[in-house]
Image: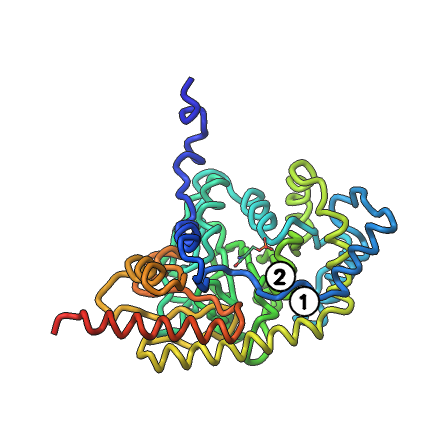
Amino acid sequence: MNLEEKISPVVRNLAPSGIRRFFDLIHSRPDAISLGVGEPDFTTPWHIREACVDALERGLTSYTSNQGMPELLEAISQYLYERFSLSYHAGSEILVTFGASEAIDIALRTLITPGDEVLVPEPCYVSYTSCVQLAGGTPVSIPTYAQHGFKLRAEDLEKAITPRSKVLILCYPNNPTGAVMRKEDWEPIAEIIKKHELLVISDEIYAELTYRGKHFSLASLPEMKNHVILISGFSKAFAMTGWRLGYVAAPPVLLQAMLKIHQYTALCAPITSQIAALEALKNGLPECEAMVSQYDRRRRFVVKAFQEIGLTCHEPQGAFYVFPSIQSLGIDAHTFAEQLIQEEGVAVVPGDVFGPSGVGHIRCSYATSLDRLDEALRRIERFVKRKREQLPL
Ligand code: PMP
């Protein structure tokens, strides 16, 4: 029996994540510094962990309601209102999920019928295209450009729309570019969304990691709430990646549809993580702010360092990534990333892993200590100097 042939063609043809290979390579260098992972270097604040320990001691080990614990749904509703002026009803418009990851998957599966086109501005988070394909949709990429700070522009969106376009996936603050969209950037986009009756999956997992001013949510613009499925989670803001907790907020009809998938495939998110998340929302915002100010210091340090090295690097306004261009070095980003690990023991991710407009760029995460960043940047500087010396005259 050929097991390979038994695998569904959609899964068989799914491309493996382009990031993985660089994680594997890094194990060959014990002194390596990884700027590759998209994960906070902080441990979850103690009082959040303690809430979970306490719950276990009290024997809280059961399922919760499919939708999530009512107190947590209430806390998310209040948080969205207070932080981003978003009005979502706890009982009918919010669902607690296994990380933002589950939320992305069920949102797509809820909306897509085979043949539907899903618009994906890129460079973008690596999961979107594959999740669209798993849901039976056709991903259609919309390029964004370094010279516009990698923001989505109305004209580029309009150009990509066809009669089959149904969903637009957005991620601001953006992984991998750090781009953010302000209210004035959203307004022309909202007009197009209305005109073409698009549905939007808005992944706002980096909302708290916005460095100048506050995050602005597309769903807070007039008439937009009905078009938007908002996704967020606890992984980035509260350094809780391993807890696997996220949520989705959407109009009741869409929420009920997503709940149908969730109740059969996940039942409910883990109770211990839900209790920890409740504590995070109640008392964790000061620590979140403290972590954000550390990311901000690192962000400024890294951007300055890349500029001093002479690589063009637009200033990221959110998330914890920089996306400098290495085009001036005459090598492609894969060669750059591979040689950088082998010669200097620093891991970065080639930009085109996130889509064709990432060509000639590398993604570096600054979710690591300033000391390690300093050392990594010294090594990159040495490496770049050598590559420049090798350039033909
Ligand atoms: N969306 C984006 C843009 C991400 O970068 C990540 C994690 N790297 C996720 C979603 C997944 O988040 P979670 O841990 O909540 O599943």
Image point (47%, 73%), residue name: 373
Disc marking residue 225: 2
**Total label count?**
2
Q: Nearer the viewer, residue 301 or 82?
A: 301
Give the farthest residue toward the front: 30
Q: Quadrant of residue 48?
A: bottom right
Image depth: mark 2 or mark 1 in front? 1
Which of disc 1 and disc 2 is earlier in sequence?
1
- Work out which quarter of the rendered image holds the C terminus and state it: bottom left
Q: How would you rate the neighbour count of disc 2 (Cα within 10 Å): few for under 14, some for 14-19, many for 20 or more?
A: many
Three-letter amino acid code at the position of disc 1? Leu
Q: CA distance from mark 2 to mark 1?
A: 9 Å
Image point (34%, 60%), residue name: 337
Image point (65%, 76%), residue name: 290
The residue beneath circle 1 is 86
Q: Quadrant of residue 64?
A: top right
Residue 281 is left or right of residue 370, and the answer is right
Three-letter amino acid code at the position of disc 2? Lys
Residue 153, percent across and down? 41, 68
